[in-house]
Amino acid sequence: MRRVLALTGASRGLGAAVAVEAARQGFDLVLNARDEARLEDVAAACRAQGAQTRLVVGDIAAADTAPALIRAAQEHFGRVDALVHNAGVLPPLAPVAEADLGAWQHNWAVNFFAAVRLLQAALPALREQRGRAVLVSSGAAVHPYPTWGAYGTAKAALNHLAGVVAAEEPLVTVVAFRPGVVDTDMQALIRSQGAGVMPPALHVRFLAYWQEGRLQPPAAVARPLVAVARAAPPSWSGAFVAYDEARVQALLAAG
Ligand code: NAP
């Protein structure tokens, strides 16, 4: 029997690659993002890998989207084996002293509070399957980058959330996942909107990742991420797991 994955941020970037890789690794999928046309294209690519798909189009910052995603999984597939909260936004890029609080709150709504809502909706089903939740985090969770305060604090909170839920839920394995630097729209935004806003040395560092071909292709990060969502052992619950760690590579090698 195919397992079932509920995935946010599935329309492009890392999430689109995760959807197709999960389909290849034997998951049926319930996919969320706001851009319906892109989501349809991703779903078609998943079906080409043999997966069944359902779409829940909507803003994950809205209160009813997360419950709708999990409800769709249960109604159409009768189970949830894995949850991946991958939707994320970087802005506002601004020092704390100058940042707009409303922009911070929107950042936290997508990056953090959506994860809380998703877990609240999914935990009963995940307990039943001894399932896994992967919260896509960032190196910015543990490195304070000037002007990235909203994003970095939300991702740090996500890491802590994984720890708290791990301590509360012995039947579910929940990890925060560090994807490295991935060649997506988010990196393009850093290069274009970071100029003159981020400290020059930090902006130049991200420009160099791109110029030197050091950004990871989304598909290369999707493979370890899906392996974690499929097979991370309970002993990892609560951890901050990087895509290139030896234990993740071992999980991949084990198939
Ligand atoms: P991306 O290319 O900008 O894609 C972001 C995804 O999130 C899109 O599918 C977007 O879909 C969705 N999304 C954004 N706001 C949303 C909202 N309000 N409601 C529903 N969906 C929303 O970003 P990415 O680089 O693939 O990032 C994926 C994850 O990896 C994020 O959590 C990010 O923080 C993390 N990450 C990325 C990097 C990197 O180098 N790229 C590094 C570390 C961590 P729609 O626009 O269609 O809604």
Image: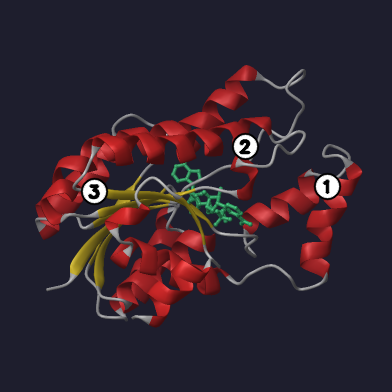
SS assignment at label 2: helix
Seen as rendered, the residue at the extreme front is: 235
* Residue type marked 1: Leu
Q: Nearer the viewer, residue 115 or 133?
A: 133
Residue assigned mark 3: 172
Q: Which residue matches tag 1?
A: 202
- Asked where in the image residue 147 lies, by quadrant, the reply is top right
Q: What type is the residue that disc 2 sits on?
A: Gly
**What is the C-alpha distance between the residues marked 2 and 3?**
26 Å
On screen, residue 66 versus residue 79, left or right, reads right
Say which label, 1 or 2, has the lower sequence index: 2
Q: Amino acid at mark 3?
A: Val
State how far apart marks 1 and 3 are (Cα): 37 Å
Quarter of the rendering occupied by the C terminus = bottom left
Residue for badge 2: 152
Q: Is residue 118 visible?
A: no
Q: Position of residue 164 (x, y in %)?
A: 36, 34
Residue shown at the point (14%, 56%) measured from the top left? 129
Disc 3: CA contacts within 10 A as few (<14), some (14-19) or many (>=20)? many
